[in-house]
Amino acid sequence: MDEIEIERRITATEQRAKSNSHRIDKLEPIIEEIHTMSNTMVKLVQEIKHTNEAVTSLDEKVERMDSRVDDIERIPGEDMKTYKRTVVTAIISTVAGALASGMLILATQYL
């Protein structure tokens, strides 16, 4: 290799180095943006995780409230059944008592 060939190779290497430096300079902001987006995605995933935990907690609370509301709604119906049963029992007792009293009165009049 002579000096001219070495000079050409060094010149070509320098030009390639300059070209590569320009390409790296263009890529640095893009890499920074990718890094920023990656950090943002990590934060978003964490927020979504917290949101899902909050939703799960709310679902459990709603289920407990649903069961309590069902119990509260059921109580008046059960009370109404008790009231009906009490009224029917009272009516039957009154009618039975009146019949028994009437039969005693009739029995005492004929005896």
Image (cartoon, grey):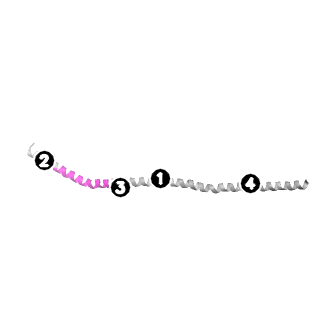
* Residue 56 badge: 1
Q: Earlier in the sequence, mark 2 or mark 1?
A: 2
How far across and how far down the image is residue 47, in percent? 40, 55
Which amino acid, by three-letter code, is at mark 4? Answer: Thr
How far across and how far down the image is residue 34, in percent? 31, 53
Of residues 50 and 36, the one drawn nearer to the viewer in this rendering: 50
Q: Earlier in the sequence, mark 3 or mark 4?
A: 3
Which amino acid, by three-letter code, is at mark 2? Answer: Arg
Which secondary structure is most common in the magenta stretch? helix
- CA distance for labels 2 and 3: 48 Å
Of residues 84 and 109, the one drawn nearer to the viewer in this rendering: 109
Task: Point out the stretch of residues depicted in magenta.
Answer: 14-37
- Bin the neighbour count of mark 3 within 10 Å (Cα to Cα): few under 14, some 14-19, many 20 and up: few
- CA distance for labels 3 and 4: 73 Å
Image vertical order of residue 107 relative to residue 1, above or below: below
- CA distance for labels 4 and 1: 49 Å
Q: Earlier in the sequence, mark 4 or mark 1?
A: 1
Which amino acid, by three-letter code, is at mark 1? Answer: Thr
How far across and how far down the image is residue 111, in percent? 91, 53
- CA distance for labels 4 and 2: 119 Å
Label 2: which residue? Answer: 8
- CA distance for labels 1 and 3: 24 Å
Q: Nearer the viewer, mark 2 or mark 3?
A: 3
- The residue at the point 48 percent across, 54 percent down is 57
Kindly state the secondary structure of the residue where label 3 is placed. Answer: helix
Q: Earlier in the sequence, mark 2 or mark 3?
A: 2
Dots 3 and 4: beta carbons under 8 Å? no
- Bin the neighbour count of mark 4 within 10 Å (Cα to Cα): few under 14, some 14-19, many 20 and up: few
Label 4: which residue? Answer: 89
Label 3: which residue? Answer: 40
